[in-house]
Image (cartoon, rainbow, N blue to C red):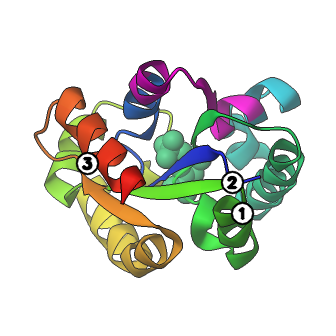
Amino acid sequence: MKDNIVLIGFMGSGKSSVGIRLAHALGYEFMDTDHYIESTYEKSIKDIFATEGEEAFRKIETDSLKELSKSLHHHVIATGGGMPLREENAALLRQIGTVIFLNASKEEIYSRLKEDTTRPLLAGENPMQRIEALLNARLPIYQKAADATVTTDQRSFYSIIEEIQKSMIK
Ligand code: S3P
C-alpha cells in the first residue's frame, strides 16, 4: 500500500537527517535501508563493498527492499543513494510510497562528506570529481523515479520538511 514517504537522492543529500525529522513531524516511523542492511547482514556497508563488491551489495539492496516493502506502513524511508538505479527498485519504491528526491549541489555534497570515511564510492583520489561524475549520471534517474523534487542546499530542516509536506498535498 502506498502509505509511506520514500526519500531518494545522492549521498549527503540529507535523506536520513531530514527523514528522521519528517517522520517525527508526521507521527510516522523512520526506516533507513542502509541501517536495515547493516543490522540484517551484521556488516557495515563499507565491509560489504570491500569483501563482496558493489554488485553483491546491489543485490542485497534489492532483496532488502522486496522484504521491507511487504510490511512497511506509515514510514518515512531513507534509501541508499544507489537504490533507484535499478528500475526494479524504482518501481517498488513508487508502489510503497510517495517518492521525494532530495537534491543537493555537488559543492554542498562535497562539503558535507569531505571528512566522511563510510562511503566506499567516494573513497580514493579526487572525491569532488567522483561526486560530479556520479551525480551527473544519476540526476535523470532520480528525477524520473520521483514524484517531487526538493532542494536541500543551505536550507533549514524546517523549510525542507514544510516543502515536502506541501508537495504531498498537491
Ligand atoms: C551509495 C550510497 C550509500 C550506501 C552505499 C552506496 C550509493 O548510502 O548505500 O555506500 O551508491 O550512492 P547513502 O546515500 O545513505 O550515503
Q: Nearer the viewer, residue 33 or 166?
A: 166
Residue at image mark 3:
109
Badge 2 marks a residue whose secondary structure is loop
In what quadrant of the picture does the C terminus appear? bottom left
Q: Is residue 45 above or below residue 128?
A: above
Is disc 1 surrounded by few (<14), some (14 to 19) or many (20+) residues within 10 Å?
A: some
Q: CA distance from mark 1 to mark 2?
A: 6 Å
Horizontally, residue 72 falls left or right of residue 75, namely right
Q: Nearer the viewer, residue 117 or 37?
A: 37
Callout 1–callout 2 Cβ contact below 8 Å: yes
Q: Is residue 133 above or below residue 63?
A: below
Residue 125's spot in the image, x, y percent?
A: 34, 55
Residue at 33% from the left image edge and 62% from the top image edge: 149
Q: Work out whether residue 69 can be spotted.
A: yes
**Predominant secondary structure in magenta?**
helix
Q: Magenta stretch: residue 107 in it?
A: no
Residue kind at label 2, given as amino acid type: Lys
Residue at image mark 1:
95
Residue kind at label 1, given as amino acid type: Gln
Horizontally, residue 34 falls left or right of residue 53, namely left
What are the residue bounds of the magenta stretch? 21-36
Image quadrant assignment for residue 71: top right
Q: Nearer the viewer, mark 1 or mark 3?
A: 1
Residue 126's spot in the image, x, y percent?
A: 28, 57
Residue at image mark 2:
2
Q: Nearer the viewer, residue 36 or 44?
A: 36
